Image: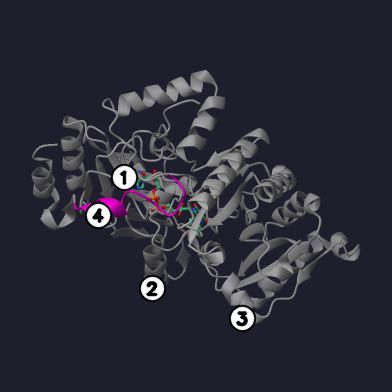
Amino acid sequence: MEGILEKLSEIVGADFVSNAAEERFIYSRDQGVQPPHAPDYVVLPNTTEEVSALIRLANKNKIPVVPMGGALVLSGLTIPQRGGIVLDMKRMNRILEVNEMSHYVVVEAGASQGMLKAYLEKHHPQLKHSIPDAPPVATIGGNIAIHGSGHLSQSEGGFHSEMVTGLEVVLATGEVLKLGSCSTVPKWFSRAPLPDLVGLFLGWNGTTGVITKIGLKLFPSPKMKDIMMFMTEDVDTVPDILFRIIGTEMAEDMAFFVSPQPAYFDGFQIIMISVVANSVKEMKMRRELICDSVRDYLERKEAGFLPLPPHMKVKLMEAPQKNLSEFADTVRGGGFEYVGAIMPVECIPQAYRKGREITEQLGITYSMGARVIGRGHAVMFYYAYPFNRADAKNMETVAKALEESNEAALEMGGIPWKAEISGQQLILGRMEPGTYKLMTEVRKLLDPNGIMNPGNWEVRS
Ligand SMILES: Cc1cc2nc3c(=O)[nH]c(=O)nc-3n(C[C@H](O)[C@H](O)[C@H](O)COP(=O)(O)OP(=O)(O)OC[C@H]3O[C@@H](n4cnc5c(N)ncnc54)[C@H](O)[C@@H]3O)c2cc1C
C-alpha cells in the first residue's frame, strides 16, 4: 500500500481521496445488520478517465475495489469485505442526454433517482423513469447493478435492469467499453440486435466492473394520477385478485402489503393500485374496468375498496413511497433491513404465512409486501425487519430472521434479491454446477486478479 494515497490523489485530487479514520468508519457499514469492515481508502472520481486510471492502479497492485452509489442496498453489498478502495460514484452524477422521441436518457452512474426525477419534471415533464421506493439519493447505477424495480415495473417492462438500453463500463483492467447500440452508432436506444453483453454487469453486485454511464428507458408521464386501495382478510385470494387486475392492463403500479402499523390495518391484506390517465374520462374508464375485474369479490362481500381521503391519496401517490423508511423507526434505533425475494405470484400466501411464523417465533415486528413485476411475471416479496442499532441482541435476532427468510424464499421457489453474502452463498449452493462454473469463469475472464467487490457471488455454501 506504500505510496498509494499519493497516487490516488494524483488521479482524483487530494480533496477526493481519504484514509482518515472517520471516513473509513462511515464507509465500513450500511444501515443493515451485516458486520462492518473498513476500507483502506475512500475515493470519489469525477470522470470515466479517472475511474479507469484508479482501476489500473488497483489492478496493478491487486487492491480490492468496491463500487458504491448511495450505499442504500441495506444488505452490506458495499461493505469492503477485504478492505481496499471504496469507489464512491456520487460525483459522477451528470444527466448527459435526453432523447424525447426515442424515450431514453443517458446518465452517469452516480446520478441519483431524485436528481433524474427532478430533472425530468423540470425539463421534460411529459417523460418519466421508473422510481424505486428507496430514498431519493439511491443512484441509477447502484439500482441497475442489483436488478432493482420501481413504480413502472408492473406496467412498463419489469426490472430496471430490463430498462437499460446501453452501458459504458470500466473493466477490472481499466479498459473502457461501450455496450448496446452506443457501441456501434452514437445513439443509446437499444441493446438489441447485438449480442447482449450488458447483462455481464447487471445483477453482479459490482463484481465484474464499474458502470460509468447508463442509457435508460423513459416512459410517457400522463397528466393525472389516482390510487385505489383494495382490502381483503383472506391472503389466499391475493394472487387471484392481482391476476385479475393485472389482466385489465389499466394499472400503472400494483403493490400488496401487510403491516401491524397503523393498528387499524392489522389483519388486512392491502393491495395498492396506481392508475394514471390523460383525461377525467380515461381515468373513470380505467377505474371502472379495475372494479369490474373484482366485482364478484365485492358482491360476495369478501373484499372491498377503501375510499381514501385526498390527503391520504397524496401521500400514497408519492414516488418514492416513504412508508418503508418510516417503518425503520417503529423500533427505537432506526435500523432496517429486508429480504426481497423474487418469486412467482402464486407464492404470496405461503410467503406471508412463513413471514408471520418467523416473526412470531423470534418475537419481532414484521412488515411484508410484494410489488408486481412485469405483467405479473413475478413479484418482489419483501420481509422487512426494523431494529435498534444500539441493541446487539436485537440485531442478532433480525440477522436470524433475515437468514430464515432467505431460506424460506428459496424453499418455496423464490430467489432472494440483493442478498447478503450468506444469502448469496445459499443461492449458489442450489445453483446448477454448470451455471456456477460459468459465472466463475466469466468473472475470472473479466477480473483476472479478483479485485472487484471480492467476497460477493463467490462461495457456494
Ligand atoms: C426504504 C428503502 C426502500 C427501498 N425500496 C426499493 C425499491 O422499491 N426498489 C429497489 O430496487 N430497491 C429498493 N431499495 C433498495 C436499494 O436502496 C435500492 O435498490 C437502491 O437503488 C440501490 O442503489 P444505491 O445507489 O444505494 O446502491 P449501492 O447500495 O451503493 O450499491 C448496490 C450494489 O451495486 C454496486 N454498484 C453501485 N454502483 C455501481 C457502479 N457504478 N458500477 C458497478 N456496480 C455498482 C455496489 O457495489 C453494490 O453491490 C430500498 C431501500 C430502502 C432503504
Q: Quick check: 222 above or below 417?
A: below
For marks 4 and 1, give the CA distance.
16 Å
Amino acid type of disc 1? Answer: Pro
Q: Say which element carries label 1.
A: strand
Q: Give the Cα separation between the discs numbered 1 and 3.
A: 40 Å
Disc 4 versus disc 2: nearer the observer: 4
* Residue 108 image point, x, y percent: 30, 53
**Residue at the image point whose x is 22% and y is 32% from the top:** 173
| Contact, mark 1 vs mark 3 (Cβ under 8 Å) | no
10 to the left or right of 396: left
- Please report the bounds of the magenta region as a residue range: 20-34
Mark positioned earlier in the residue sequence (4 or 2): 4
Residue labelled with disc 3: 311
**Any atom of ligand 1 within 8 Å of the CB at mark 1?**
yes
For marks 1 and 3, the one nearer the N-term is 1
The foreground one among 433 and 169 is 433
Check disc 4 and report the residue beneath it.
23
Q: Tell me: residue 292, above or below residue 408.
A: below
At 45% from the left and 39% from the top, the residue drawn is 203
Q: Which numbered disc, 3 or 4, marks the residue that appears first in the sequence?
A: 4
**Foreground residue among 375 and 220:** 375
Label 3 sits on what residue type? His
Q: Earlier in the sequence, mark 4 or mark 1?
A: 4
Alpha-carbon distance for marks 3 and 4?
41 Å
* Residue occupied by mark 1: 67
